[in-house]
Amino acid sequence: MKTFKYTLDKSSKKYVCPKCQKKTFVKYLETDTGHYLSDYFGRCDRETNCNYHNKPLGNNINTFLSSDKRQLIPSYHNMDLLTKSMRAYDRNNFISFLKTIFSADEVYSAIRKYKIGTSKNWNGSTIFWQIDNHNRIHGGKILQYNSTTGKRMKDKKNKALINWVHSILKRRKQLENFNLSQCLFGLHLTNQNTKKIAIVESEKTAVIMSMFKPQYCWLATGSKQAFKLEMLLPIKGFEIIAFPDKSEYTDWNLKAIKLNKIGFRIHVSKILEYTNYPIGFDLADLITFHREKDKSFNNST
Ligand SMILES: [Zn+2]
């Protein structure tokens, strides 16, 4: 085995990063003595947000940690697991909510399209599987909704309920290691896709919009931060329109400008930004909001 003069500290010890001041800094040490180099030699773990990496001079340096290798190999779920989850829609809160807006036929075709699952994690919870354009299953995100309002449900600490299929399997000792590397929700639909791609943040909104505006292929990032190169790379060849939640326009637009410089074709919609809707409002809220208004209008006439 090759021995390096200097190496990143393989113990899990983290220090304060000289750049971002977070405790995510791995220092370099001299292999022979085990002594750290000065406080400025090291690598920040926040690769995307900080990216500080100051290597000692020379070639005989190990800049790689074994944990890096694990991160590079994504894990996938097998298709059986997904297939088994595609049932019990009569007790799936999100599906019940969809049926208050769309016909049963429309809802079932959306279920088949996005391969939406039902979980027992919370009674009536929904699984949004992240399946890529090679039909590999990157993960299953479990969310809980209110079946009447379609809003996310929260725990006692007022945190929206979220879990992952791999976390549950690990807890049950049915899975040992799982390296979650997320992909866009709906990415599998881009196989043989000829439509313009529309991107939103939430899975729920992508599913709703796919029925409301089927002329687009609707995908979801799953979080604000996931609107980034690694996630969007598989759809680089497509024309893309992004619909950020209200108040996220500036952030997504800046990212899109950078991505367009390297060949992406992303247009970021301002449709929600210059409205009086509350912060975080998205396209699905817009539709349900107007539906409620229509209902009260019809009731009063
Ligand atoms: Zn840092």
Image (cartoon, rainbow, N blue to C red):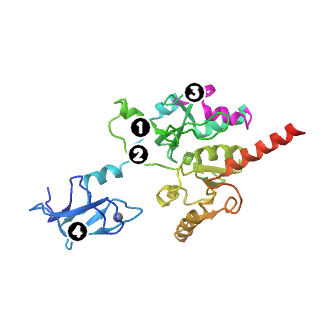
Q: Nearer the viewer, mark 4 or mark 1?
A: 4
Earlier along the polypeptide chain: callout 2 or callout 4? 4
Residue that mark 2 sits on: 180
Residue that mark 4 sits on: 39
Measured Cα–Cα span from mark 2 to mark 3: 24 Å
CB-based contact (under 8 Å), mark 2 and mark 1: yes
Measured Cα–Cα span from mark 3 to mark 4: 55 Å
Secondary structure beneath disc 3? loop
Does the beta carbon at disc 2 come under 8 Å from ligand 1?
no
Quarter occupied by residue 9: bottom left
> Picture coordinates of residue 41 (x, y %)?
24, 68
CB-based contact (under 8 Å), mark 4 and mark 1: no
> Picture coordinates of residue 178 (x, y %)?
36, 41
CB-based contact (under 8 Å), mark 3 and mark 1: no
Q: Which residues are magenta?
A: 85-103
Earlier along the polypeptide chain: callout 2 or callout 3? 3
Whether residue 18 appears in magenta in the rendering, the answer is: no
Q: Residue 166: which numbered mark, if any?
A: 1
**Amino acid at dot 4:** Asp
Q: Quadrant of the N terminus?
A: bottom left
Measured Cα–Cα span from mark 2 to mark 1: 8 Å
